[in-house]
Image (cartoon, grey):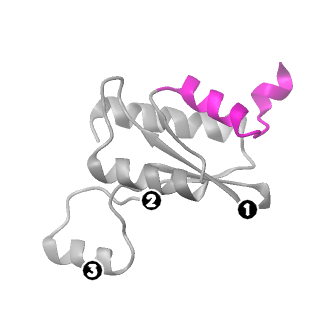
């Protein structure tokens, strides 16, 4: 993850904490440098390449995924494959480049936020 994506990631998590505190938001830390042995161990435990950066769990057990990219960033082949699987399974997922992308997705997904209630 480059620095722009990391800054966007942190800003989006902060935003979600303020406007949608009822959501359970977490990052499945699949990335990062690991030894080959550690990577094999984690893969055997279910780590899956291409899983989006954020998982949002809403009341009622509804689940949504957000992949965060820089303005010019693009999905890796593994991320594209996971995205297609999610689409086929009917799982809501987006690629977000800004808080505005997340704001729009929350609205489209029918998730109430403090922001929407104040408007």
**Please, is residue 43 above or below residue 114 in the view?**
below
Counting from the top left corner in percent of width and height, residue 61 is at 73, 62
Q: Is residue 106 magenta?
A: yes
Find the magenta span and give its range: 98-119
Q: Which residue carries the number 3 mark?
A: 41
Q: Which residue is painted at 75% across and 49% down in the image?
A: 22
Q: Is residue 27 visible?
A: yes
Assess disc 2: are there few (<14), some (14-19) or many (≥20) residues with their C-alpha within 10 Å of its C-alpha: few
Of circles 1 and 3, which is in front? 1
**Type of secondary structure dominating the magenta stretch:** helix
Quadrant in which residue 57 is drawn: bottom right
Q: In terms of secondary structure, where does tag 3 sit? A: helix
User: Residue 51's image quarter?
Assistant: bottom left
Dot 1: what SS?
Answer: helix
Give coordinates of residue 76: x percent, y percent. Answer: 28, 45
- Mark 1 or mark 3: name the one nearer the start of the chain: 3
Q: Quadrant of the N terminus?
A: top left
Q: Which mark is residue 61?
A: 1
Residue in the foreground of this view, choosing between 117 and 10: 117
């Amino acid at each position: 993850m480059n620095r722009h994506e990391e800054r966007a990631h942190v800003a989006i998590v902060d935003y979600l904490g303020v406007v949608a505190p009822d959501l359970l938001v977490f990052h499945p830390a699949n990335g990062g440098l690991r030894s080959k042995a550690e990577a094999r161990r984690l893969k055997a435990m279910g780590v899956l390449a291409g899983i989006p950066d954020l998982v949002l769990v809403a009341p009622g057990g509804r689940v949504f995924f957000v992949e965060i990219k820089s303005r010019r960033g693009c999905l890796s082949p593994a991320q594209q494959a996971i995205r297609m699987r999610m689409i086929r399974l009917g799982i809501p997922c987006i690629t977000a480049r800004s808080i505005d992308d997340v704001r729009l997705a929350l609205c489209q997904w029918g998730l109430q936020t403090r922001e929407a209630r104040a408007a």
